[in-house]
Image (cartoon, rainbow, N blue to C red):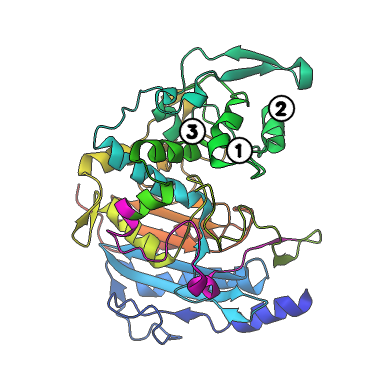
């Protein structure tokens, strides 16, 4: 392991700062200096932005993360993008601008946008019970107490609505905790990848909800169910509809539910910690190798993307549904997506989310005073299980994206540092209200 860390440390010294010229090739020659960049760009101090690189380098030099890519965009101009460390330690490959990342839960906003294009066409209403479209989910039960054969369940007092899926208030779970319901999730063939597409919802219906629909926030397979809704309403496999409605119009050529063979060399390796706490390449990566088109397109976490593709998607949201002359959603639709939809008693939605409410598939800042980071009211975003991260700030017209590949997310809090180090570099006047 010491040899691996030495490789990381030595090669991480070649971290590269890519030019902010939007017209430049993603594979252009790199520079080790920001001397050619003006001191201030789009309201950012370039000197202060360099603090991002220094802090990210610490994570790499300490052997915590193999490689990191960070990007900051303001007013639709990229003011910072840096590749640091290794894309694949075993292959001796430094992080590249065109690296493809497993984005896991950063899939959720993409699936949500796909569903919202159907909402805009009048295909469903937010208060519709989901069983109207997916009848397998009609007879759901709710956990009350007990375990095993003595587990007590009750009927739902109201049906799971589509809005409950978007906001993670339906009662579904992921199996991440030690609760009795999550134990059932972990034992389910659905969560073990042993079901066929036509069997998945029936298996889900066998599992009790954690709580009555709409009464609590509980992270779970909700957006995966939204993916099935998209398939039912569009008559297409989720990936095909996403490609038609989002990826092709926005020219997001490196985003999808698997990596084609000709691009496999660009897929970044995923890392985790061994029993001694050392950073090692992960075996049995969740959801498979992402190198073949899966039978089930996982709407909650099954996509791959690049930092530039996701930047295009984020700019579409920041620009109220349009980017590069292509409109995906209407302005009011995006406003609805990024608004907090949780009642006051559910804000913050988690003990680790002070100051945060929840929109559709993304958290949204409702109280900057309670927030433990720099930010603006109404900024929103989410992250992925393998340490990918994005945040959009409509007040500052700002996008922050971080890409790493370490599971579980949050083990090494580089994204928290990226967020604060971005905001501290803003030196222009406060935006007019």
Q: Secondary structure at mark 1?
A: loop
Identify which residue, 296 or 167, lies in the foreground.
Answer: 296
Residue 159, x across and y down, in percent: 46, 18
Which of the two discs, 2 and 3, labels the residue nearer the N terminus? 3
Which of the two discs, 3 and 1, labels the residue nearer the N terminus? 3
Residue at the disc numbered 2:
180
- Quarter of the image for residue 218 reads top right
Q: Secondary structure at mark 2?
A: helix
Q: Secondary structure at mark 3?
A: loop
How much space separates mark 2 and mark 3, taking CA atoms?
19 Å
How much space separates mark 1 and mark 2, taking CA atoms?
12 Å
Residue at the disc numbered 1:
174
- The reply to whether callout 3 and callout 1 are in contact (CB within 8 Å) is no
Q: Residue at x 25, y 32 (%)?
A: 122
Residue 206, x across and y down, in percent: 62, 25
Relative to 302, is 48 above or below?
Answer: below
Relative to 195, is 341 above or below?
Answer: above
Dot label at residue 401? none
- Asked whether the viewer can see residue 162, the reply is yes
- Circle 1 Cα neighbour tier, 10 Å, few/some/many (<14 / 14–19 / ≥20): some
Apparent side of residue 4 relative to residue 97 in the rendered image (left or right): right
Which of the two discs, 1 and 2, labels the residue nearer the N terminus? 1
- The reply to whether callout 1 and callout 2 are in contact (CB within 8 Å) is no
- Outermost residue, right side: 276
- Whether residue 247 appears in magenta in the rendering, the answer is yes
Apparent side of residue 427 relative to residue 149 in the rendered image (left or right): left
Apparent side of residue 273 relative to residue 204 in the rendered image (left or right): right
Read off the magenta span. 244-273
- Circle 3 Cα neighbour tier, 10 Å, few/some/many (<14 / 14–19 / ≥20): many
Dot label at residue 168? 3
Residue 209, x across and y down, in percent: 58, 24
Q: Residue at x 64, y 84 (%)?
A: 10
């Amino acid at each position: 392991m010491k040899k691996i860390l030495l490789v990381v440390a030595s090669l991480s010294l070649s971290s590269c700062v890519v030019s902010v010229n939007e017209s430049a090739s993603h594979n252009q020659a790199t520079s080790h200096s920001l001397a050619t960049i003006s001191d201030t760009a789009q309201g950012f101090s370039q000197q202060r932005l360099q603090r991002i690189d220094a802090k990210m380098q610490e994570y790499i030099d300490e052997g915590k993360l193999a490689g990191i890519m960070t990007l900051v965009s303001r007013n639709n101009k990229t003011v910072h993008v840096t590749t640091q460390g290794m894309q694949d330690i075993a292959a001796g490959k430094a992080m590249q601008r065109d690296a493809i990342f497993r984005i896991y839960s950063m899939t959720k906003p993409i699936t949500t946008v796909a569903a919202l294009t159907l909402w805009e066409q009048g295909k469903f209403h937010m208060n519709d019970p989901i069983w109207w479209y997916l009848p397998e989910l009609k007879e759901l039960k709710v956990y009350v107490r007990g375990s095993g054969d003595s587990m007590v369940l009750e009927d739902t007092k109201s049906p799971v609505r589509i809005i409950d899926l978007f906001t993670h208030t339906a009662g579904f779970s992921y199996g991440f905790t030690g609760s009795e319901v999550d134990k059932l999730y972990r034992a389910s063939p659905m969560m073990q990848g042993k079901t066929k597409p036509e069997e998945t919802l029936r298996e889900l219906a066998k599992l009790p909800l954690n709580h009555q629909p709409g009464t609590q926030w509980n992270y779970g397979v909700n957006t995966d169910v939204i993916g099935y809704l998209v398939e039912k309403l569009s008559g297409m496999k989720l990936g095909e509809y996403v490609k038609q409605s989002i990826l092709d119009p926005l020219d997001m050529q490196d985003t999808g539910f698997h990596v084609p063979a000709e691009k496999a060399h660009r897929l970044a390796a995923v890392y985790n910690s061994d029993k001694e706490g050392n950073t090692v390449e992960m075996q049995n990566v969740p959801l498979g190798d992402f190198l073949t088109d899966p039978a089930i397109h996982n709407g909650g976490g099954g996509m791959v993307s690049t930092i530039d593709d996701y930047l295009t998607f984020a700019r579409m949201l920041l620009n109220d549904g349009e980017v590069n002359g292509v409109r995906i959603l209407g302005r009011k639709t995006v406003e609805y997506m990024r608004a907090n939809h949780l009642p006051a008693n559910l804000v913050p939605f988690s003990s680790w989310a002070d100051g945060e409410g929840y929109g559709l598939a993304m958290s949204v800042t409702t109280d900057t005073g309670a927030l433990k980071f720099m930010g603006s009211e109404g900024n929103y975003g989410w992250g992925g299980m393998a340490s990918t991260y994005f945040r959009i700030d409509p007040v500052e017209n700002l996008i922050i994206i971080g890409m790493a590949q370490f599971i579980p997310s949050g083990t090494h809090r580089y994204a928290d540092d990226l967020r604060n180090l971005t905001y501290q570099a803003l030196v222009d006047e406060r935006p007019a209200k």
